[in-house]
Image (spheres, rainbow, N blue to C red):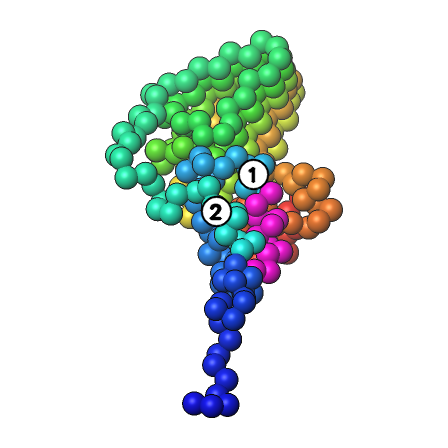
């Protein structure tokens, strides 16, 4: 019909990638990035970088670049045999540093001896196949550091403390269902045992960027706690 104006669409010069994204679109991409990081497709640094871009994305094109190198389905079509966790893992740190981080498989039990130096167990991206982990430790000197995430709880009621220190930092995500219960027993001599959540980087603190666990569990909502 003469004089009728058709709705403006991509065929009128506006590319689909230039269309404005909504809050729902951004949330969907953020969730996809979190899943990809949980599957080991992204490192924690890559996740932080992409989340920052996703928060500030204005168009579909900006969001599309964040997941362009990720599979469209959650997992590859070929079946992958699950990794069986070990019954026991022993760490004997006489000096220096011993670290378990990234996508390491959490065993059923651990024996940790720290004569000097530092042992860090980071559960942020760990593969968890059991509901509990028993840790028998002896910290004569040095530090045993446990990095938690939503769903990971630490109990030290059966731990003997001599002249050292045990500190459980209250997490900022409030009450969430426990998916891994860590029970620590043994003794702390003159060293330190600390269980805490992942800390912000200086850049994340300056830009007030939420941590991944805040996106996962709505951290701080109604708790009055500010993540540090």
Nearer to the camera, 36 or 149: 36
Q: Is residue 72 left or right of residue 27?
A: left
In the rendered image, residue 199, in percent from the top left (x then y), is placed at: 63, 38
Residue at numbered disc 1:
46
2 vs 1, front mark: 2
In the rendered image, residue 155, in percent from the top left (x then y), is placed at: 48, 34
Query: Which residue lies at the image location 46% right of the left edge and 56% below the top edge?
Result: 28
In the rendered image, residue 222, in percent from the top left (x then y), is placed at: 58, 60
**Image quadrant assignment for residue 95:** top right
Q: Residue 15, relative to residue 91: is it above or below?
A: below
Marks 2 and 1, how far apart at CA: 12 Å
Nearer to the camera, 158 or 195: 195
- As for residue 57 lying within the magenta part, the answer is yes
Q: Residues within 10 Å of mark 2 (few under 14, many from 20)?
A: some
- The residue most toward the right is 206
Query: Which residue lies at the image location 52% right of the left edge and 14% below the top edge?
Result: 113
Q: Residue 71, relative to residue 220: is it above or below?
A: above
Q: Residue 126, relative to residue 178: is it above or below?
A: above
Numbered marks: total: 2
What is the secondary structure assignment of the residue under circle 1? helix
Q: Which residues are magenta?
A: 49-59
Q: Is residue 140 left or right of residue 112?
A: right
Q: Residues within 10 Å of mark 1 (few under 14, many from 20)?
A: few
Labelled disc at residue 210: none
Residue at numbered disc 2:
67
């Amino acid at each position: 019909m003469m004089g009728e104006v058709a709705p403006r669409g991509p065929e009128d010069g506006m590319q689909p990638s230039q269309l404005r994204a909504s809050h729902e679109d951004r949330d969907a991409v953020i969730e996809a990035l979190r899943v990809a990081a949980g599957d080991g497709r992204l490192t924690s640094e890559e996740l932080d970088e992409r989340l920052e871009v996703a928060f500030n994305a204005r168009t579909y094109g900006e969001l599309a670049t964040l997941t362009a190198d990720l599979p469209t389905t959650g997992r590859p079509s070929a079946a992958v045999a699950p990794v069986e966790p070990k019954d026991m893992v022993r760490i004997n740190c006489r000096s220096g540093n011993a670290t378990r981080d990234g996508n390491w498989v959490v065993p059923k039990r651990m024996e940790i001896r720290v004569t000097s130096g530092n042992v860090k167990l980071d559960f942020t991206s760990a593969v968890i196949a059991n509901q509990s982990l028993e840790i028998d430790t002896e910290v004569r000197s040095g530090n045993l550091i446990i990095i938690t995430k939503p769903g990971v709880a630490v109990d030290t009621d059966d731990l003997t403390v001599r002249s050292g220190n045990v500190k459980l930092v209250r997490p900022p995500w409030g009450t969430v269902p426990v998916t891994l219960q860590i029970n620590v027993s043994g003794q702390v001599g003159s060293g330190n045992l600390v269980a805490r959540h992942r800390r912000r980087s200086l850049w994340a603190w300056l830009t007030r960027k939420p941590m991944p666990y805040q996106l996962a569990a709505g951290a701080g909502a109604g708790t009055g706690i500010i993540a540090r």
